[in-house]
Amino acid sequence: QKEVEQNSGPLSVPEGAIASLNCTYSDRGSQSFFWYRQYSGKSPELIMSIYSNGDKEDGRFTAQLNKASQYVSLLIRDSQPSDSATYLCAPRVRLRGSTLGRLYFGRGTQLTVWP
Amino acid sequence: IAGITQAPTSQILAAGRRMTLRCTQDMRHNAMYWYRQDLGLGLRLIHYSNTAGTTGKGEVPDGYSVSRANTDDFPLTLASAVPSQTSVYFCASSDGASTQYFGPGTRLTVL
């Protein structure tokens, strides 16, 4: 069973602060890593992907990957109330006998940004 | 607008009834997926399809079946619904190499 663990939350930060979301995964065969944001009652939407060790920045979001430690994180700078949502970590693993992959999702971390 | 559509948006179903959840995508993606999302358990894969004509089982396939007659459609059928199948169901698609895109979901309640 492939495990994806996220900080349990809920996480509450003031507007303008940095929110730090963490994720560890058990499958060393994970090839790429995705962060999805899910607002209450809505479907998940992709906000970041990362494939190589190190940092990847996109606007206020920075994803960090350390494959040796099997750890991936998401930092949200200058947090806004509109960032309040559940954040899902999802490593991608190749399907057996296929070139295609599937995502394994963590249970998510609920983030609240208060004004 | 390109994307994934699901129907119905929500449904209340009596236990023992048969139900098909519909999913259609217009992005010509080869891979399609069905997930269920339950409070505290996250998204769990039910079935997937790499390409038209092929399907595979995810981690929670029991009680569900799928078919993939063409690239665009990937229906999920509950042959005889049970209350434990009460959940929110998401269909997703990808081109196989990267991002999965999710449909808006179907909220199913089995009484």
Image (cartoon, coloured by chain):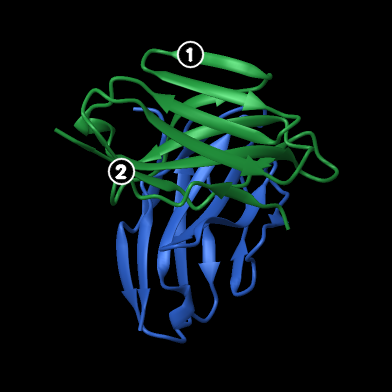
Asked whether the viewer can see residue B29, the reply is: no
Q: Quadrant of the N terminus of chain B?
A: top left
Q: Is residue B86 above or below residue A7?
A: below
Image spot of residue B65 (x, y percent): 61, 66
- 2 and 1 marks on the same chain: yes
Image spot of residue B105 (x, y percent): 38, 52
Q: Which residue is mark 2?
A: A39
Is label 2 in a helix, a strand or a loop?
A: loop
Residues under numbered marks 2 and 1 in contact, where contact means CB atoms less than 8 Å apart = no
**Which chain, by letter, is green?**
A
Q: Amino acid at mark 2?
A: Tyr
Position of B111 with respect to B102 (left or right) is: left
Of circles 2 and 1, the one toward us is 1
Q: Chain of mark 2?
A: A
Displayed quadrant of residue A17: top left
Q: CA distance from mark 2 to mark 1?
A: 22 Å
Q: Which residue is mark 1?
A: A57
Counting residues from the start of the chain, the first of labels 2 and 1 encountered is 2
**Which chain, by letter, is blue?**
B
Residue furthest to the right in view is A97
The residue closer to the viewer here, B43 or B61, is B43
For the point 64% across and 66% down, which residue is it? Answer: B61
For the point 48% across and 13% down, which residue is it? Answer: A57
Q: Residues within 10 Å of mark 2 (few under 14, many from 20)?
A: some
Asked whether the viewer can see residue B45, the reply is: yes
Displayed quadrant of residue A52: top right
The residue closer to the viewer here, A55 or A106, is A55
For the point 59% across and 44% down, which residue is it? Answer: B32
Q: Residues within 10 Å of mark 1 (few under 14, many from 20)?
A: few
Q: Chain of mark 1?
A: A
For the point 54% across and 49% down, which residue is it? Answer: A106
